Amino acid sequence: MKAEEQIRQLQETVEQLKAENDLLLSRNMQLSEQLCMWYEMRQHVNWLKEEMEIDRRNLMVADLTDDAELLAVIETRLEQDTSLLKGEFSGSQLASLIGVSQARLTKLFRNTTYKSADDYLDFVRLVRAMQLLREHPEYGIVGVSEDAGFKSVRTFQRHMQEAVGMSPVEFRMMLEKSK
């Protein structure tokens, strides 16, 4: 009798395990379906991101044959990300950033008052530095030079002297007197 009872208990355990296995298989199928749906959704999202990036690039360079529009695109891009002016950012990097050839950028600056893209970038750095001198009197000249993106304080001082006829210190003193 004891053997029959053990067999019956084993059969019940097997039935319980089969039922649990069926539940696990059902849950696994549900999770697999959800994973497939998630994967398809991710593919669609990635495709949309790629399309949006293409559209963004196309809008950014919509009509870069017009000098004024190209200059507006450049100015907008530099205003949006002032960190681009830092360090060794150059005219060739600017051309890459906005998606035009170096020759197109050279043509743009020949048609304007700037001699080259690098001259333009130095001008933008100088305007930024003058803004910092005006808005942040607590900044030192070295800090202003670095924040504006000049390679050295001496370069900043030279550009300032050439552009406005005074050093950064003299410019700051003039600002303080005019307050």
Image: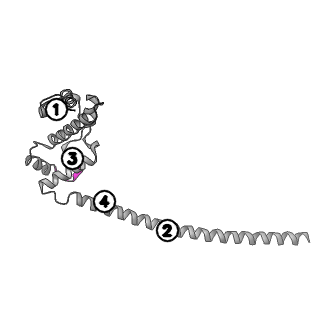
Q: Which residue is mark 4?
A: 53
Amino acid type assigned to the residue bearing label 4 in the image? Glu
98, above or below 166, in the image: below
Q: Which residue is mark 1?
A: 160
Amino acid type assigned to the residue bearing label 2 in the image? Cys
Q: Which residue is mark 2?
A: 36
Q: Residue furthest right?
A: 1
The foreground one among 58 and 168 is 168
Distance, label 4 to label 3, CA atoms, is: 19 Å
Mark 1: few/some/many CA within 10 Å (<14, 14-19, 20+): many
Distance, label 1 to label 2, CA atoms, is: 61 Å
Query: Is mark 4 in CB contact (under 8 Å) with mark 2?
Result: no
Main secondary structure found in the magenta portion = loop
Q: Is residue 23 a member of the stretch shown in magenta?
A: no
- On the picture, is 35 further left or further right than 175? right
Mark 3: few/some/many CA within 10 Å (<14, 14-19, 20+): many
Amino acid type assigned to the residue bearing label 1 in the image? Met
Q: Earlier in the sequence, mark 1 or mark 4?
A: 4
Q: Which residues are magenta?
A: 97-101
The image quarter containing residue 82 is top left
- On the picture, is 2 further left or further right than 9? right
Q: Which residue is mark 3?
A: 94
Q: Which residue is at 27% across, 48% downward?
A: 80
Q: In what element is the residue under mark 3? A: helix
Distance, label 1 to label 3, CA atoms, is: 23 Å
Mark 2: few/some/many CA within 10 Å (<14, 14-19, 20+): few
Find residue 66 and name its label. none
Amino acid type assigned to the residue bearing label 3 in the image? Leu
- For discs 1 and 3, the disc positioned in front in the rendered view: 1
- On the image, the x and y values in percent for residue 32 come to 54, 68
